[in-house]
Image: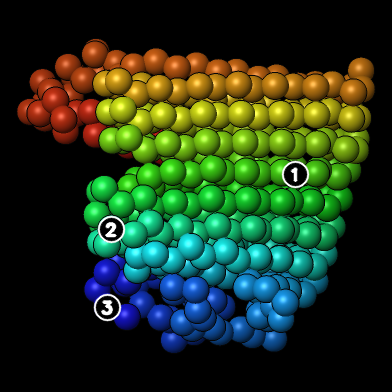
Amino acid sequence: MNENTKFILEQVSGLHDIPQAGIYNIRENGKLLARNIDEEVNIISKKDKDGIDIVVKPNTKNKSIHIPVIVSMGGLNDLVYNDFYIGDNADILIVAGCGIHNTTDKQSSHNGIHSFHIGKNCKVKYVEKHFAFGNAKTSKILNPTTEIVVGEGSVFEMETLQLGGVSFADRKTYAKVKKDAKLLIRENILTSSKEEAITHFEVELEKEGSRVEVVSRAVAKDKSKQEFNSIVIGKAECFGHVECDGILADNAEIISTPKIIAKSPEANLVHEAAIGKISEEQQNKLMSLGLTKEEAEKVIIQGFLK
Protein backbone atom coordinates (compact mmCIF):
# COMPACT_ATOMS: atom_id res chain seq x y z
CA MET A 1 0.00 0.00 0.00
CA ASN A 2 1.19 3.55 -0.72
CA GLU A 3 1.12 6.29 1.91
CA ASN A 4 -2.28 7.70 0.85
CA THR A 5 -3.86 4.24 1.08
CA LYS A 6 -2.34 3.72 4.52
CA PHE A 7 -3.63 7.13 5.61
CA ILE A 8 -7.18 6.30 4.48
CA LEU A 9 -7.02 2.91 6.18
CA GLU A 10 -6.01 4.50 9.46
CA GLN A 11 -8.70 7.19 9.25
CA VAL A 12 -11.61 4.81 8.68
CA SER A 13 -10.52 1.73 10.62
CA GLY A 14 -7.66 2.57 12.97
CA LEU A 15 -5.38 0.09 11.17
CA HIS A 16 -1.93 1.33 10.16
CA ASP A 17 -1.19 -1.40 7.62
CA ILE A 18 -2.40 -4.87 6.70
CA PRO A 19 -2.45 -6.71 10.06
CA GLN A 20 -0.42 -9.85 10.65
CA ALA A 21 -3.26 -11.31 12.71
CA GLY A 22 -6.92 -10.68 13.52
CA ILE A 23 -10.07 -10.83 11.43
CA TYR A 24 -10.36 -8.48 8.49
CA ASN A 25 -11.48 -7.95 4.92
CA ILE A 26 -9.88 -4.97 3.15
CA ARG A 27 -11.28 -3.86 -0.21
CA GLU A 28 -9.48 -1.40 -2.49
CA ASN A 29 -10.79 0.00 -5.78
CA GLY A 30 -13.46 -2.67 -6.16
CA LYS A 31 -11.22 -5.65 -5.42
CA LEU A 32 -10.16 -7.71 -2.42
CA LEU A 33 -6.82 -6.48 -1.05
CA ALA A 34 -6.46 -8.70 2.02
CA ARG A 35 -8.49 -11.08 4.20
CA ASN A 36 -8.01 -13.12 7.35
CA ILE A 37 -10.46 -15.30 9.30
CA ASP A 38 -10.44 -17.77 12.19
CA GLU A 39 -12.43 -20.74 13.46
CA GLU A 40 -15.21 -18.56 14.90
CA VAL A 41 -15.62 -15.90 12.20
CA ASN A 42 -15.79 -16.71 8.50
CA ILE A 43 -15.82 -14.22 5.61
CA ILE A 44 -17.10 -15.53 2.29
CA SER A 45 -17.16 -13.70 -1.05
CA LYS A 46 -20.59 -13.62 -2.69
CA LYS A 47 -20.88 -15.50 -5.96
CA ASP A 48 -23.75 -13.59 -7.57
CA LYS A 49 -22.66 -9.97 -6.83
CA ASP A 50 -19.93 -7.93 -5.22
CA GLY A 51 -19.84 -8.27 -1.47
CA ILE A 52 -19.24 -10.65 1.40
CA ASP A 53 -21.04 -12.77 3.99
CA ILE A 54 -19.64 -12.44 7.51
CA VAL A 55 -20.68 -15.44 9.60
CA VAL A 56 -20.10 -15.33 13.37
CA LYS A 57 -20.65 -18.55 15.28
CA PRO A 58 -22.84 -18.61 18.42
CA ASN A 59 -21.09 -17.77 21.72
CA THR A 60 -18.22 -15.95 19.99
CA LYS A 61 -16.80 -13.43 22.48
CA ASN A 62 -14.42 -10.47 22.42
CA LYS A 63 -13.79 -10.48 18.69
CA SER A 64 -13.00 -7.47 16.46
CA ILE A 65 -13.78 -7.58 12.75
CA HIS A 66 -12.40 -4.91 10.39
CA ILE A 67 -13.96 -4.50 6.93
CA PRO A 68 -12.74 -1.15 5.52
CA VAL A 69 -13.14 -0.03 1.92
CA ILE A 70 -10.60 2.19 0.15
CA VAL A 71 -11.21 4.09 -3.09
CA SER A 72 -8.01 5.66 -4.39
CA MET A 73 -8.83 6.40 -8.02
CA GLY A 74 -11.19 8.55 -10.06
CA GLY A 75 -14.04 7.23 -12.18
CA LEU A 76 -14.85 4.30 -9.87
CA ASN A 77 -18.46 3.83 -8.75
CA ASP A 78 -18.26 0.92 -6.33
CA LEU A 79 -21.26 -1.07 -5.02
CA VAL A 80 -21.10 -3.89 -2.47
CA TYR A 81 -23.59 -6.03 -0.58
CA ASN A 82 -22.42 -7.24 2.82
CA ASP A 83 -24.49 -9.57 5.01
CA PHE A 84 -23.69 -10.20 8.68
CA TYR A 85 -25.02 -13.34 10.37
CA ILE A 86 -24.41 -13.10 14.12
CA GLY A 87 -25.03 -16.27 16.16
CA ASP A 88 -26.78 -16.30 19.54
CA ASN A 89 -24.86 -14.98 22.57
CA ALA A 90 -22.08 -13.40 20.48
CA ASP A 91 -20.20 -10.32 21.73
CA ILE A 92 -18.29 -8.59 18.91
CA LEU A 93 -17.02 -5.28 17.49
CA ILE A 94 -17.29 -4.54 13.77
CA VAL A 95 -15.29 -1.63 12.32
CA ALA A 96 -16.31 -0.69 8.79
CA GLY A 97 -16.23 2.55 6.84
CA CYS A 98 -14.91 3.91 3.57
CA GLY A 99 -12.32 6.47 2.57
CA ILE A 100 -11.95 8.10 -0.85
CA HIS A 101 -8.79 9.74 -2.22
CA ASN A 102 -9.47 11.25 -5.63
CA THR A 103 -7.12 13.72 -7.31
CA THR A 104 -8.66 13.36 -10.80
CA ASP A 105 -11.51 15.24 -12.48
CA LYS A 106 -13.71 12.10 -12.53
CA GLN A 107 -16.29 11.33 -9.81
CA SER A 108 -15.69 8.48 -7.36
CA SER A 109 -18.31 6.80 -5.18
CA HIS A 110 -18.93 3.87 -2.90
CA ASN A 111 -22.36 2.47 -2.07
CA GLY A 112 -22.45 -0.12 0.69
CA ILE A 113 -25.58 -2.17 1.40
CA HIS A 114 -25.12 -3.76 4.85
CA SER A 115 -27.65 -6.22 6.31
CA PHE A 116 -27.39 -7.42 9.91
CA HIS A 117 -29.12 -10.57 11.11
CA ILE A 118 -28.61 -10.55 14.88
CA GLY A 119 -29.42 -13.63 16.93
CA LYS A 120 -30.66 -13.78 20.53
CA ASN A 121 -28.84 -12.24 23.51
CA CYS A 122 -26.05 -10.75 21.42
CA LYS A 123 -23.99 -7.64 21.99
CA VAL A 124 -22.80 -6.02 18.77
CA LYS A 125 -21.07 -2.68 18.26
CA TYR A 126 -20.80 -1.43 14.68
CA VAL A 127 -18.55 1.55 13.87
CA GLU A 128 -18.79 3.11 10.40
CA LYS A 129 -16.50 6.00 9.44
CA HIS A 130 -16.53 7.96 6.19
CA PHE A 131 -13.80 10.29 4.97
CA ALA A 132 -12.65 11.80 1.65
CA PHE A 133 -9.97 14.11 0.32
CA GLY A 134 -8.24 15.09 -2.91
CA ASN A 135 -9.41 17.38 -5.72
CA ALA A 136 -11.91 19.76 -4.09
CA LYS A 137 -13.77 20.20 -7.39
CA THR A 138 -14.35 16.48 -7.96
CA SER A 139 -17.34 14.69 -6.43
CA LYS A 140 -16.61 12.09 -3.78
CA ILE A 141 -19.85 10.28 -2.93
CA LEU A 142 -20.63 7.81 -0.12
CA ASN A 143 -24.12 6.31 0.17
CA PRO A 144 -24.43 3.71 2.96
CA THR A 145 -27.59 1.69 3.50
CA THR A 146 -27.88 -0.33 6.71
CA GLU A 147 -30.63 -2.88 7.39
CA ILE A 148 -30.80 -4.34 10.89
CA VAL A 149 -32.88 -6.98 12.64
CA VAL A 150 -32.05 -6.95 16.36
CA GLY A 151 -32.90 -10.34 17.82
CA GLU A 152 -34.63 -11.01 21.13
CA GLY A 153 -32.66 -9.77 24.14
CA SER A 154 -29.84 -8.39 22.00
CA VAL A 155 -28.13 -4.99 21.97
CA PHE A 156 -26.94 -3.42 18.72
CA GLU A 157 -24.91 -0.22 19.01
CA MET A 158 -24.20 1.74 15.83
CA GLU A 159 -21.70 4.59 15.75
CA THR A 160 -21.53 6.38 12.42
CA LEU A 161 -19.21 9.27 11.60
CA GLN A 162 -18.69 11.41 8.52
CA LEU A 163 -15.31 13.02 9.06
CA GLY A 164 -15.19 15.52 6.20
CA GLY A 165 -14.48 15.88 2.50
CA VAL A 166 -17.53 13.91 1.32
CA SER A 167 -19.28 15.84 -1.45
CA PHE A 168 -22.60 14.06 -1.13
CA ALA A 169 -23.97 11.36 1.17
CA ASP A 170 -27.39 9.73 1.29
CA ARG A 171 -27.39 7.66 4.47
CA LYS A 172 -30.24 5.22 5.09
CA THR A 173 -30.83 3.00 8.13
CA TYR A 174 -33.79 0.63 8.51
CA ALA A 175 -34.24 -1.45 11.65
CA LYS A 176 -36.64 -3.88 13.32
CA VAL A 177 -36.22 -4.38 17.06
CA LYS A 178 -37.53 -7.57 18.68
CA LYS A 179 -38.61 -8.41 22.24
CA ASP A 180 -36.42 -6.94 25.01
CA ALA A 181 -33.88 -5.81 22.42
CA LYS A 182 -32.11 -2.45 22.18
CA LEU A 183 -30.88 -0.38 19.26
CA LEU A 184 -28.50 2.48 20.10
CA ILE A 185 -27.46 4.85 17.32
CA ARG A 186 -24.97 7.71 17.52
CA GLU A 187 -24.41 9.80 14.39
CA ASN A 188 -21.83 12.60 13.94
CA ILE A 189 -21.63 14.52 10.66
CA LEU A 190 -19.48 17.50 9.68
CA THR A 191 -19.99 19.25 6.35
CA SER A 192 -18.30 22.29 4.84
CA SER A 193 -17.84 24.02 1.48
CA LYS A 194 -20.84 22.96 -0.70
CA GLU A 195 -21.13 19.42 0.70
CA GLU A 196 -24.53 17.82 1.26
CA ALA A 197 -25.52 15.02 3.65
CA ILE A 198 -28.94 13.40 3.96
CA THR A 199 -29.81 11.00 6.79
CA HIS A 200 -32.86 8.79 7.03
CA PHE A 201 -33.59 6.53 10.02
CA GLU A 202 -36.65 4.27 10.11
CA VAL A 203 -37.04 2.03 13.16
CA GLU A 204 -39.87 -0.35 14.04
CA LEU A 205 -40.21 -1.34 17.69
CA GLU A 206 -42.05 -4.59 17.11
CA LYS A 207 -42.33 -6.35 20.46
CA GLU A 208 -42.69 -5.63 24.16
CA GLY A 209 -39.57 -4.35 25.87
CA SER A 210 -38.01 -3.15 22.61
CA ARG A 211 -36.07 0.11 22.75
CA VAL A 212 -34.30 2.58 20.46
CA GLU A 213 -32.19 5.63 21.22
CA VAL A 214 -30.96 7.83 18.37
CA VAL A 215 -28.59 10.75 18.97
CA SER A 216 -27.52 12.82 15.96
CA ARG A 217 -24.95 15.62 16.10
CA ALA A 218 -24.61 17.80 13.01
CA VAL A 219 -22.22 20.65 12.19
CA ALA A 220 -22.76 22.50 8.91
CA LYS A 221 -20.36 25.22 7.75
CA ASP A 222 -19.83 27.45 4.70
CA LYS A 223 -22.55 26.71 2.09
CA SER A 224 -23.09 23.06 3.04
CA LYS A 225 -26.46 21.47 3.69
CA GLN A 226 -27.65 18.69 5.98
CA GLU A 227 -31.03 17.01 6.21
CA PHE A 228 -32.03 14.68 9.05
CA ASN A 229 -35.15 12.51 8.84
CA SER A 230 -36.24 9.92 11.38
CA ILE A 231 -39.31 7.76 11.85
CA VAL A 232 -39.84 5.62 14.94
CA ILE A 233 -42.85 3.30 14.96
CA GLY A 234 -43.97 1.78 18.25
CA LYS A 235 -46.07 -1.37 17.82
CA ALA A 236 -46.05 -2.63 21.41
CA GLU A 237 -44.97 -1.69 24.93
CA CYS A 238 -41.68 -0.01 23.99
CA PHE A 239 -39.50 3.08 24.33
CA GLY A 240 -38.12 5.30 21.58
CA HIS A 241 -36.08 8.47 21.89
CA VAL A 242 -34.68 10.57 19.02
CA GLU A 243 -32.44 13.57 19.67
CA CYS A 244 -31.07 15.72 16.86
CA ASP A 245 -28.81 18.69 17.67
CA GLY A 246 -27.07 20.89 15.14
CA ILE A 247 -24.59 23.74 14.96
CA LEU A 248 -24.96 26.09 12.02
CA ALA A 249 -22.30 28.49 10.76
CA ASP A 250 -21.81 30.85 7.82
CA ASN A 251 -24.43 30.31 5.06
CA ALA A 252 -25.08 26.64 5.75
CA GLU A 253 -28.48 24.96 6.18
CA ILE A 254 -29.80 22.20 8.45
CA ILE A 255 -33.23 20.61 8.12
CA SER A 256 -34.44 18.29 10.88
CA THR A 257 -37.64 16.24 10.61
CA PRO A 258 -38.15 13.75 13.44
CA LYS A 259 -41.39 11.74 13.31
CA ILE A 260 -42.93 9.28 15.77
CA ILE A 261 -45.84 6.91 15.18
CA ALA A 262 -47.54 5.05 18.02
CA LYS A 263 -49.54 1.94 17.09
CA SER A 264 -49.96 0.81 20.69
CA PRO A 265 -51.16 2.72 23.78
CA GLU A 266 -48.16 1.23 25.59
CA ALA A 267 -45.64 2.87 23.24
CA ASN A 268 -43.55 5.63 24.84
CA LEU A 269 -41.97 7.73 22.09
CA VAL A 270 -40.09 11.03 22.36
CA HIS A 271 -38.31 13.24 19.85
CA GLU A 272 -36.23 16.39 20.26
CA ALA A 273 -34.57 18.70 17.75
CA ALA A 274 -32.42 21.79 18.33
CA ILE A 275 -30.31 23.89 15.95
CA GLY A 276 -28.14 26.80 17.05
CA LYS A 277 -24.90 28.63 16.46
CA ILE A 278 -21.53 28.38 18.17
CA SER A 279 -21.71 29.96 21.60
CA GLU A 280 -19.95 33.32 21.66
CA GLU A 281 -19.37 32.87 25.39
CA GLN A 282 -17.52 29.59 24.81
CA GLN A 283 -15.59 31.07 21.93
CA ASN A 284 -14.52 34.17 23.89
CA LYS A 285 -13.47 32.02 26.85
CA LEU A 286 -11.18 29.92 24.66
CA MET A 287 -9.80 33.00 22.90
CA SER A 288 -8.92 34.48 26.30
CA LEU A 289 -6.63 31.47 26.75
CA GLY A 290 -4.69 32.43 23.65
CA LEU A 291 -6.54 30.56 20.90
CA THR A 292 -7.43 32.26 17.64
CA LYS A 293 -11.09 32.49 16.62
CA GLU A 294 -10.62 29.63 14.14
CA GLU A 295 -8.86 27.45 16.73
CA ALA A 296 -11.59 28.12 19.29
CA GLU A 297 -14.28 27.18 16.75
CA LYS A 298 -12.47 23.92 15.99
CA VAL A 299 -12.23 23.00 19.69
CA ILE A 300 -15.95 23.71 20.23
CA ILE A 301 -16.95 21.64 17.20
CA GLN A 302 -14.74 18.70 18.23
CA GLY A 303 -16.28 18.75 21.72
CA PHE A 304 -19.81 18.91 20.30
CA LEU A 305 -19.23 15.94 18.02
CA LYS A 306 -17.79 13.71 20.77
Kind of residue indicated by mark 3: Asn
Mark toward the viewer: 3 or 2: 2
Q: Give residue 182's quadrant in the image.
A: top right
* Residue designated by label 2: 105
* Residue 22 seen by the camera: no
Q: Give the mark nearest the N terminus, 1 or 3.
A: 3
Residue drawn at x 73%, y 58% as measured from the top left: 116
The foreground one among 236 and 209 is: 236
Dividing the picture into quadrants, the one containing residue 58 is bottom right
Which one is nearer the viewer's eye here, 267 or 277? 277
Q: Nearer the viewer, residue 112 or 25?
A: 112
Q: Position of residue 295 (x, y in %)?
A: 16, 33
Q: Determine whether label 2 and label 1 are within 8 Å by CB.
A: no
Q: Secondary structure at mark 2?
A: loop
Query: Mark 1 Cα within 10 Å, few/some/many (few <14, many 20+)?
Result: many
Closer to the N terminus: mark 3 or mark 2? 3
Q: Position of residue 304 (x, y in %)?
A: 38, 31
Measured as percent of width and height from the top left, residue 257 is found at 60, 21
Dot placed on the residue nearer the N-terminal end, 2 or 1? 2
At 49% from the left and 73% from the top, the residue drawn is 30
Q: Is residue 67 left or right of residue 28?
A: right
Q: Nearer the viewer, residue 225 or 244?
A: 225
- Scheme by which the image is coloured: rainbow
From the image, tell me which residue sits under label 3.
2
**Secondary structure of residue under mark 3:** loop
Q: Which mark is residue 175?
A: 1
Q: Is residue 200 left or right of residue 251?
A: right
Identify the residue at horizontal 36%, vertical 50% (top origin). Answer: 139
Q: Quadrant of the C terminus?
A: top left
